[in-house]
């Protein structure tokens, strides 16, 4: 954990998408103090004819949903949202007005990790 699911309007080059994935990984490491092996990001392109923003078919958008283990404070989450927004603007060449980010806190007992254990159970086992 963290897990990011990102949707972006189609039309970006592979170089832009790769840059975003790499920059987003750095943002997560630096702002959320997440260990690299725990970071997961998926990027999905949505064809312009298959989306609508503010009543306009095909308007550009970037939607970022970040699933985080609960426990981070509001300041840390705000820093993350600002940094991931900047990474999207810089890497994907989009306006910051078309980006929306949602942070969803997940209780440790509701997140499966290694060996099919919940994060809570894994932590407890690792502590003993």
Image (spheres, rainbow, N blue to C red):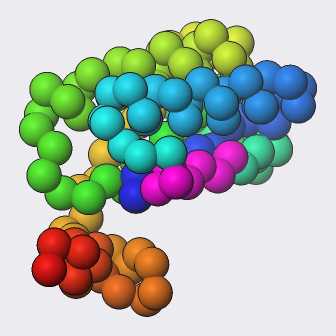
Q: Quadrant of the C terminus?
A: bottom left
The answer to whether residue 61 is visible is: no
Q: Position of residue 43 (x, y in %)?
A: 68, 46
Q: Position of residue 6 (x, y in %)?
A: 58, 45
Q: Position of residue 115 (x, y in %)?
A: 46, 87
Is residue 41 covered in magenta? Answer: yes
- The front one of 124 and 70 is 124
Q: Residue at x 31, y 36 (%)?
A: 32
Residue 46, above or below 91: below
Q: Residue at x 38, y 79 (%)?
A: 112
Residue 57, above or below 46: above
Q: Quadrant of the N terminus?
A: bottom left
Of all residues, the one furthest to the bottom in this rendering is 116
- The front one of 50 and 113 is 113
Q: How many numbered circles does the render carry?
A: 0
Q: Is residue 102 left or right of residue 60?
A: left
Residue 90, above or below 118: above
Of all residues, the one furthest to the front in this rendering is 128
- The front one of 29 and 125 is 125
Picture quarter containing residue 14? top right
Q: Is residue 109 left or right of residue 51?
A: left
Q: Position of residue 100 (x, y in %)?
A: 44, 32
Q: Residue at x 77, y 31 (%)?
A: 17
- The front one of 23 and 67 is 23
Residue 121, above or below 85: below
**Magenta segment, which residues?**
37-43
Q: Residue at x 52, y 54 (%)?
A: 37
């Amino acid at each position: 954990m963290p897990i990011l699911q990102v949707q972006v309007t189609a039309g970006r080059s592979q170089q832009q998408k790769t840059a975003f994935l790499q920059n987003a990984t750095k943002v997560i490491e630096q702002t959320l103090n997440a260990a690299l092996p725990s970071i997961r990001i998926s990027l999905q392109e949505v064809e312009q004819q298959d989306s609508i923003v503010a009543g306009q078919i095909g308007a550009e958008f970037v939607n970022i949903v970040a699933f985080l283990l609960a426990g981070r404070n509001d300041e840390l989450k705000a820093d993350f949202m600002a940094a991931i927004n900047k990474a999207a603007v810089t890497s994907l060449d989009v306006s910051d007005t078309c980006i929306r980010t949602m942070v969803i806190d997940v209780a440790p007992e509701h997140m499966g990790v290694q060996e099919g254990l919940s994060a809570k159970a894994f932590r407890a086992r690792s502590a003993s």
